[in-house]
Amino acid sequence: MSKGFYSKLALQNIKKNGKIYVPYLLMSIFITAMYYIIYSLSVNKGLDHTTGGSSIKQILGMGTWIVGFFALIFLFYINSFLMKRRKKEFGLYSMLGMEKRHLGRVVFWENTIIAVFSIITGILLGLLLNKLVYMGLVNMFQSEIPLGFEISFSSIIASVKLMGTIHLLIFLNGLRQVWLANPIELLHGENVGEREPKTKVLMAVMGFLCLGAGYYLAVTTTNPVAAIFVLLLAIILVMIGTYFTFTAGSIAILKLLRKNKNYYYKTKHFVSVSGMIYRMKQNAVGLANIAILCTGVLLMISTTLSLYADLNGIIDKRYPRDITVSGFSLNEDVTDLVLENVKEASEELHLETNHLFYYSYIAMPAIISGDELITNQENIYGLSGSDICDLYILSLDEYNRLNGDKKELEDGEILFYGSEDDIEKQNLQLLGKSFSIKENLKDFAEGSGLMSSNVVQSFVLIVKDTETIEEIKQLQQSVFESEGGSYVNAGAFFGFDVKGDSSQKMAFKQHIITGLEPSPESFRVDDRDTGSKDFLGTYSGLFFIGIFLSLLFVVATVLIIYYKQISEGYDDCGRFEIMQKVGMDKREIRRSINSQVLNVFFLPLVTAGIHTLFAFPIMKRLMLMLGLNNTTLYLVVTGICFLIFAVFYAVVYKLTARVYYKIVS
């Protein structure tokens, strides 16, 4: 054969099959550009000099691994559609005298052309879009970020390595399929899987059980610390359940519909149900992938958008004043020490302070079981079915001074506050003592910033006097020495505003730190300005990654849907041609198509909605760990995201349905 024959033939094949190759090529370019952008931002040294930059660099670094992993999955999966459409063509080449080594060369050149073109174009596109992403990050950070527009050669090398490796693996997989198949199998490769699949009852039952177990874990887990680990397990169970349910459950449902004579023996249902039964085995994985991708998009964008939208509220709860001072493991009252330092700093720096608040407390971790707070278990932070919490105990005098109230308590009475709105109790038992709850407080104090930073649920007990606090302290000390469990920590929390600019507030903070250094106690001094920038950097990074990955998942979803419609269109073309010959008109064909596509197409969207609904309780717990306790906002954002995505999904359906109809017509 002439020199360059195989490369010319490969290029001709790509042009001739543009309907299936162009979307694949665009996806490869898109992923290359996205990987270059996120990698270049993750290694940009300018972020090292930005407050909150270290947080976003870590988040972007994790994002590069996620994008790389899904790039491999998406491109492999989409390439499987291409190979299915090309098998018949390769079979014809074999019948015309081409050997497998010749077909291997064609496959090599096709993959090489696509790989080289997509990598070069993707990197160039990434260089251009990098500027746009830079502007988006500047807007998210609400400040100037020292990011340059330089070309990141390390990012180019990383992108070439990743995409080159993926395309090499795709080529080897395609070569394997061509090499192992005989010409007859290649000719009929499109029709593989046309036998009626058997109903796999065990798989269907396992699918529903996995879904049920995943949903149960998501709904019943109330411990935010355990929620991280439980979420991973729930995700695995739901993914397995989704694949099993779509693979076996969908076939069982379709066969039940076929047995329903009133439903099945109608023109629009007969063709669609019978066709779906035969193809569901090979389409089930695609539908399950679409459902999982849709769920991923909804969860990522709703959570990160909620965090970013409520950023100011989260900062207000965490930093109720310009400067906050936290004291831990204090063995004596340090109120006078801290207040004296605040006074000295104010006088020396000539800065006025206001809105001062402070309170002292004792604290211990506990596990709540019904109406009992248990503090005598070893490994108190181990995972359990109960709720772990941080328990704070204050005197009534401290509470009244802090809130300007004049509440009164009798012996054995307490005021109770839970950090979650739906927590209300009538009685509590602690260390063998029974307490009657006189009032469930809706709010503990305006400046409870210390508790807002907790990753677990917080309970506050307001007892009658300091004698009761001392009694509880002694009881817990005895339990700790004899049985192990929680150790009592004494603490104090202070907050105040400073009238001045950012530099003056930082000087005030440093003066406080210097004044407390001689003390043997442990203190932590925070300022709102620095904390706000850290939160802004972290949550902006999360929102950016959420948008980035959601965009990747959306594009992948659209392409999977597109290839699924094309694949089904070619599979159904002969079937509808036969139906037209036996008297089925175009109007009936369109109705049958609509019935088939609607039944299958919107099933992943409905499934994603159900997954998101059951994931809401556990995601709400995780949001609490990140400081978001505005459940209403999270619920509204999730609902809006689902509606917008459903509209987008419907638009994709209309566009791809037209492609399908043109093929079968």
Image: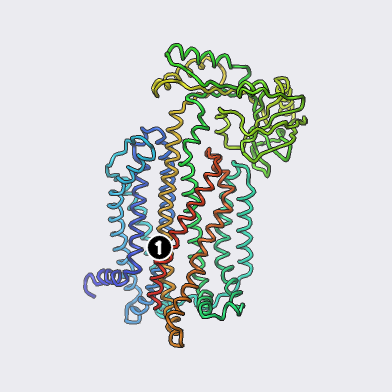
Q: Quadrant of residue 43?
A: top left
At 46% across and 80% down in the image, what residue appears?
588
At 54% across and 63% down in the image, what residue appears?
243
Tell me if I can see residue 69 in this picture: yes
Q: Nearer the viewer, residue 158 or 308?
A: 308
Instruction: Report the side of 522 relative to 41 (left or right).
Output: right
Q: Quadrant of residue 224?
A: top right
Tell me if I can see residue 329 in this picture: no
Residue ranking furthest to the bottom:
582
Instruction: Report the side of 454 relative to 55 (left or right).
Output: right
Instruction: Report the side of 188 relative to 260 (left or right).
Output: left
Please state the horizontal and vertical placement of residue 649, each as a whole percent of the image.
45, 61
405 w.r.t. 120: above or below:
above
Please state the horizontal and vertical placement of residue 305, each as a whole percent of the image.
46, 45
The local crowd at label 1, few if under 14, some if 14 to 19, many if 20 or more residues have their Cα within 10 Å, is: many
316 w.r.t. 395: above or below:
below
Please state the horizontal and vertical placement of residue 26, each as a whole percent of the image.
33, 60
At 49% across and 73% down in the image, what residue appears?
596
Q: Quadrant of the N terminus?
A: bottom left
Q: Nearer the viewer, residue 613 or 101?
A: 613
How was the colour assigned to the protein in this rendering? rainbow
Q: Nearer the viewer, residue 548 or 184?
A: 548
Q: Find numbered disc 1 in the image and state the secondary structure of the residue it sits on.
A: helix
Going by the numbered disc 1, the residue's amino acid type is: Leu
410 w.r.t. 41: above or below:
above
Q: Which residue is mark 1?
A: 559
